[in-house]
Image: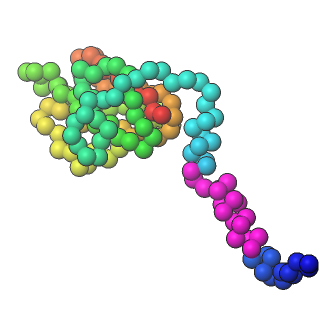
Amino acid sequence: MIAPRISTHRWLAVAACCLAPLALAGCSPASATTATVTSSPSALPACKAPAADGLPHSAGSITQTDTGVYCLGVGKLIDIFLTAPAGSASRWSEVQIADTSVLSYGNNGVMTAMRDETPGVVVGRARGVSTVTSTLPNGQSWTATIVVS
């Protein structure tokens, strides 16, 4: 029995259809993200979820009383609400991020801060660990650690 002969054009079309997804998979953003995530051999520290705040856009929130180590996914948000001490005219400074390759500033334009409150939003950018800090004019500081995975 003789096998049917496939024209060169049809063979090229079949090969292109079969090989194109494989070639594109190597160039997709998902594969770049996977390479970034798996390239770090160091283990991340233990962390806990931030308090659920009920805001639909957020993974949770932390305040000036939260000084632990908190978990956050890549692309997820944590809201930060720092309230000035009672009876003080001083407010917390703007929230600072130690490592902007791990965390980035989110848009807090949709939040209305309460009186004497400094709001902030941070977004998990890449796997790793960073701190967020703020300071009162009297020198008192606040720090929390965020683990992005």
Q: In this rendering, is residue 148 above or below 47?
A: below
Q: Nearer the viewer, residue 113 or 45?
A: 45
**Structure colour scheme:** rainbow
Q: Is 120 placed left or right of 33 in the picture?
A: left
Q: Quadrant of the N terminus?
A: bottom right
Q: Nearer the viewer, residue 31 or 7?
A: 7
Q: Position of residue 113 (x, y in %)?
A: 17, 39
Q: Is 125 placed left or right of 121 in the picture?
A: right
Q: Which residue is at 70% across, 71% downward? A: 17
Q: Which residue is at 42% across, 37% downward? A: 73
Q: In this rendering, is residue 140 above or below 18?
A: above
Q: Position of residue 21 (x, y in %)?
A: 66, 63
Does the stretch in magenta take in 48? no
- Main SS of the magenta part reads helix
Q: Quadrant of residue 112?
A: top left
Q: In this rendering, is residue 62 above or below 20?
A: above
Q: Which residue is at 36% across, 24% downward? A: 48
Q: Is residue 10 visible?
A: yes
Q: Which residue is at 50% across, 38% downward? A: 126
Q: Is residue 98 visible?
A: no
Query: Which region of the structure is painted magenta?
Result: 14-30
The residue lying furthest to the right in this view is: 2
Q: Position of residue 79 (x, y in %)?
A: 28, 37
Q: Nearer the viewer, residue 78 or 48?
A: 48
Q: Quadrant of residue 58?
A: top left
Q: Is 86 placed left or right of 100 in the picture?
A: left
Q: Nearer the viewer, residue 1 or 98?
A: 1
Q: Position of residue 142 (x, y in %)?
A: 30, 20
The residue lying furthest to the left in this view is: 87
